[in-house]
Amino acid sequence: MFVVAVVILLAPVASASSSGMNFIDSTTINKSDAYTNSVTVNPNQTIIASSYSKYIELHDSSTMELIEKFNLGREVYDIEFSPNGNYIAASLTANEAIPDSLVVIDVNSLTIKPEQARANNRPGNVDWSSDGSRIIAPNMNNGAQIYNSTTMAKTISLNGAHTSDVTCVGFSRTNQYYVTGDESGIVQLWDASGDALSFTIDVEEEVVGCDFSALDAKLGISTVTGNIFSYTTGGTLLQSIDLNQNHDLIWSITEDILYVLESDSTPELIALDGSTFAQIHTTKLMHKSLDFSIFEDNGMVDKIYIATDSNHIAIYGTPSYPEGYGVMGSDLDGDKIPDTLDLDDDGDSFQDDWDFNCLNSTVCSRDPDLQTIRSMVVEISGNTLIIEDIYTMSQEDTYTFRNLTRRGIISDQRISYEETNMLENAICNNMDKNDYIQKLRSSIELSIGQVNNGTTQCEILSGLSFTKTFDKEQLKFSFKTTFDVAPNVTIPLEVYLTDQISVVESSITHIVENHPILINQKTLEDESLLTLWWISDDAEQSILNFSAAEKGDSQINSALDMITDNISVIVILSISTILTVWALIRRKNLNSVILNDEDFENDTEEDDDTEQAHEDYEFEEEYTKPEPIVDNNYTNIAVDDEPIHTESIPNEERPTDRRAFTLDDDLTAQDKKEIRRRSGRIQRTTQGPIMTTKRKRLDGKLDIPGEKVIRKKTVKKTTANQGTPVKKVRKVRTTRKED
């Protein structure tokens, strides 16, 4: 193991580029809660076989339709097509009651052959010899058994080398060797006659994959924790590398390339150089991966079939053009598929039969929904031009991706943040970014300068819920590319988009609509200008104008400019206003100078009347004093006639003469007697104010304002002796006696 550790440390580390392979399609198993665990494809890639639970299903690889479904009654561990594609070998769970657990399905007749054999009750794989005449499978004796594929009779037993259940078996390419590996990490090679070779390989952990390279030059081994080893058929260690958790490996048929299926939180199919274990390229996967099958074309991977642990078999490869591409005919959206064959005429990701997303059109399939068509957001930031290319998947594809992703890490039926990132990485890393940047850069022209360099960033915008499984929103993703503008951005600037580029052959955009495009221009004032760009033979290129906003002058400058521009009008208005005001004042003054004799006569008469009223008021005749009431029922009560002191009412104060309120007023008011005064204007005479209120008299009558006022005048009697004081009069009031 010291040698292994040294090799691991000295193993070359290289960053692999993307394989350029993208998700193409998937089969769908009828049972929604199916957990596919194995997959195999016939040599001409026309039939895809998959297994889950106790079922095996066959699907047409072109239409993805179900061909046949087999119920084998027991859990299926592994399935494998024969080299000629006529049969499928399946390893089932073995038990004492039903020992036969190795069955063969006739694909041509779609029947299960009656000849069966006994395998192991521990999960393990099966393999065919290169000529299809034999089948190898683990047995229940900690070994493996080789059977005749026609009669299912035992031909060779490989026992005695393992002390635990065998988990991996296989034939060499030349049929000269067999290999077996167990759950404790022991790997044994056997010759064609079934004798164990003299050496044993120990990788110290469960073996999950084993395969021979072309011409039996090397043996590849993978373990449950992700360690990958390569040995010679003589038992010499060549290379090793740790690639995290994986489930299987396959050597290329014609090239020295080892394909490893990594299935951890970032699943991917890795292509390693068979001699150095340097990573050649990788294909990112967006789902959990338990088994795979590959097909090559001239030494390059053409298709990858992945068992996803869901009710799908995911297919990756180089996209091909859809049916009807290039056929002549009316084409509304410009995707080069005539409307008679195009399922989505307006390119808004809604199939014509289910397209009801329109407002003012009776034929919604001809009126695209601006929320779901492809869009480009174009803006300028500093000396860079930023273009965000946004695509929307159809509802059917959104459901497929959501179903694949929700079991990406754990089978909780929900999409976590990590699983969303896994899908995002798969979409972004599998595209050929250099091809996209080059095409986009070639389609951009500037009125001043040019765009250089370019970096692209991928992102999932919406359509994947982090907490819910049933999310009706369609999946949106974007490619955001930033270009440098050389020498620099000069405003005003015009940006010309000369072509609606398409990268369907090198990205996942082949499954979404690419035309038409909604251009969303972000102006320098951060406003959005929307333009629907259709593609046609006579369509004009899209032109985007970026101009600087005019800076508004200050209010003072604006006022001065306005005054300067209208100085003559202001002078005329000013002179007119002055003359008008002068004329009005002059007219008012003239009217006030005119004196009429009649006005003076009226004033004189009023003064005479006022003086006469005052004289009448002073020299009224003395009224008689009422006699006191004399009655036996009344008694006389002496009342001192005290003089009534009155206080003259001052002139009404003007508001400006009033004293302000202070807090000391409350204290002063307690010591002073409250004096009530009348409000409003008070008429006054030389004797004092004229009272207009009703006052009750001693005789029970009321003094009514406006009637003749009767006053008692005090008559001063003269005596011989002026020094004698006036005798005080005592008044007597009579009251009724009490009973």
Image (spheres, helix red, strand yellow):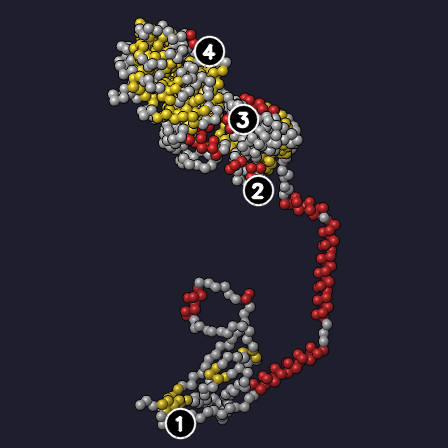
* CA distance separating discs 4 and 1: 155 Å
Image x and y of residue 369, in percent: 55, 38
Say what secondary structure mark 3 lies in: loop
Find disc 2 in the rendering and name its residue: 362
Q: Quadrant of the N terminus?
A: top left
Find disc 3 in the rendering and name its residue: 322
Say what secondary structure mark 2 lies in: loop
Find disc 1 in the rendering and name its residue: 630
Q: Counting residues from the N terminus, which is met first, the one under dot 3 or under dot 1?
A: 3
Residue 12 in view here? no
Q: Are marks 4 and 2 in contact (CB under 8 Å)?
A: no
Find disc 4 in the rendering and name its residue: 254
Q: Are marks 3 and 1 in contact (CB under 8 Å)?
A: no
* CA distance separating discs 2 and 3: 28 Å
Say what secondary structure mark 1 lies in: loop
Identify the amino acid type marked 2.
Thr
Is residue 399 positioned above or below 603 on the image?
Answer: above
Quadrant of residue 83 in the image?
top left
Residue 58 in the figure: left or right of residue 146: right
Q: Quadrant of the C terminus?
A: bottom left
Identify the residue shown where x is 56% and y is 24%: 437
Quadrant of residue 81 in the image?
top left
